[in-house]
Image (tube, rainbow, N blue to C red):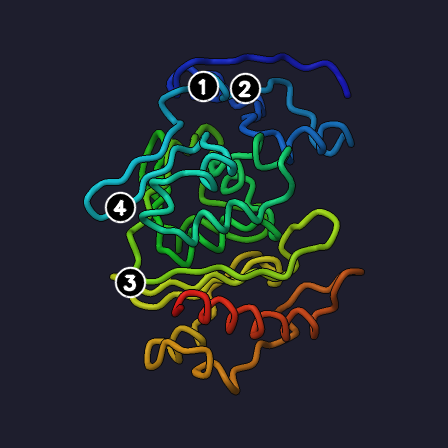
């Protein structure tokens, strides 16, 4: 590690003020990515702004037609929430599939989205559910929020405050996890609701999370696993590493999609 300043504000406005000077300060939500990268000297912010005491961006509530989750709500809190279970039960399963107990009790929804790791689980759920990311400045549609590997629409001094999810008719997520860390080697989220049918894939694409529009069109006609027969994924668009090559990931996308549809339709 190295020397850096540390601040723990109690409000969003205080946190935003600490980011406004353009010095390269970084927000600390759950720290599941920032701390390891700092230890490896891959990131060296002069100031770390810890959001753990900002109560206004924590919590879960349901409105008439939306589920709203605060950015600093942990994965464990989402997984164990009766409010989430009643509104979008599949979202509980997304959260409980993340990492291990340590990760789930430290990692947060907002941190996961702001980092936009290509193997993260939440981006697929947020994109498939057509959620809206609320910040201290504006509202950003999921389709506009994710912009490539580790890249989002967030500005340097912008802070995610909450995420609002339309309540779907059906939703499920299926993933092929890395056996050691349980990150998504391939994960597919499928939703059917007011926004139509949406299918989002994480862990596989070279540019991060993406929508599988061919699958969406097929499922719009028949929301069954059999509707996906014959649909293939272009391996040239997939990641390839020591865990799974591009062709295998392309195959897994179709397998996980069928499993997600089966779970959603059950």
Looking at the picture, tell me which residue is in the foreground, 42 or 197.
197
Q: Residue 193 carries which label?
A: 3
Image quarter in which the C terminus is found? bottom left
Tag 1 residue: 15
Tag 4 residue: 66
Please tell me whether mark 4 sits on a helix, a strand or a loop. strand
* x and y percentages locating residue 116 in the rendered image: 55, 46
Q: How far apart are marks 3 and 1 (CA)?
A: 36 Å
Return the disc, 1 or 2, that comes first in the chain's sequence.
1
Q: How crowded is mark 3: few (under 14 residues within 10 Å), some or many (20 or more)?
A: some
Return the disc, 1 or 4, that comes first in the chain's sequence.
1
Image quarter in which the N terminus is found? top right
Tag 2 residue: 49
* x and y percentages locating residue 121 in the rendered image: 54, 51
Looking at the picture, tell me which residue is in the foreground, 167 or 211.
167
Please tell me whether mark 2 sits on a helix, a strand or a loop. strand
Task: Give the left or right position of residue 41, taking residue 57 as reference.
Answer: right
């Amino acid at each position: 590690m190295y020397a850096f300043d540390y601040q723990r504000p109690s409000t969003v406005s205080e946190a935003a003020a600490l980011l406004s000077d353009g010095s390269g300060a970084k927000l600390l939500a759950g720290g599941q990515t920032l701390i390891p990268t700092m230890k490896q000297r891959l990131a060296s912010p002069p100031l770390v702004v810890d959001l753990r005491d900002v109560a206004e961006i924590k919590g879960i509530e349901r409105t008439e037609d939306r589920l709203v989750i605060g950015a600093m709500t942990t994965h464990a809190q989402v997984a164990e929430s009766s409010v989430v279970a009643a509104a979008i039960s599949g979202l509980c399963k997304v959260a409980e599939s993340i990492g291990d107990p340590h990760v789930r009790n430290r990692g947060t929804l907002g941190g996961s989205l702001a980092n936009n790791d290509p193997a993260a689980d939440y981006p697929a759920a947020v994109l498939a559910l057509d959620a809206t990311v609320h910040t201290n400045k504006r509202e950003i549609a999921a389709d506009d929020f994710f912009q490539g590997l580790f890249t989002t629409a967030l500005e340097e001094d912008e802070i995610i405050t909450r995420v609002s999810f339309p309540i779907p008719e059906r939703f499920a997520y299926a993933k092929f996890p890395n056996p050691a860390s349980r990150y998504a080697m391939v994960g597919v989220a499928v939703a059917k609701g007011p926004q139509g049918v949406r299918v989002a894939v994480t862990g596989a694409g070279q540019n991060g999370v993406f929508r599988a529009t061919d699958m969406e069109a097929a499922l719009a006609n028949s929301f069954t696993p059999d509707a996906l027969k014959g649909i293939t994924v272009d391996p040239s668009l997939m990641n390839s590493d020591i865990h799974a090559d591009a062709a295998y990931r392309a195959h897994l996308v179709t397998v996980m999609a069928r499993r997600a549809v089966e779970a959603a339709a059950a």
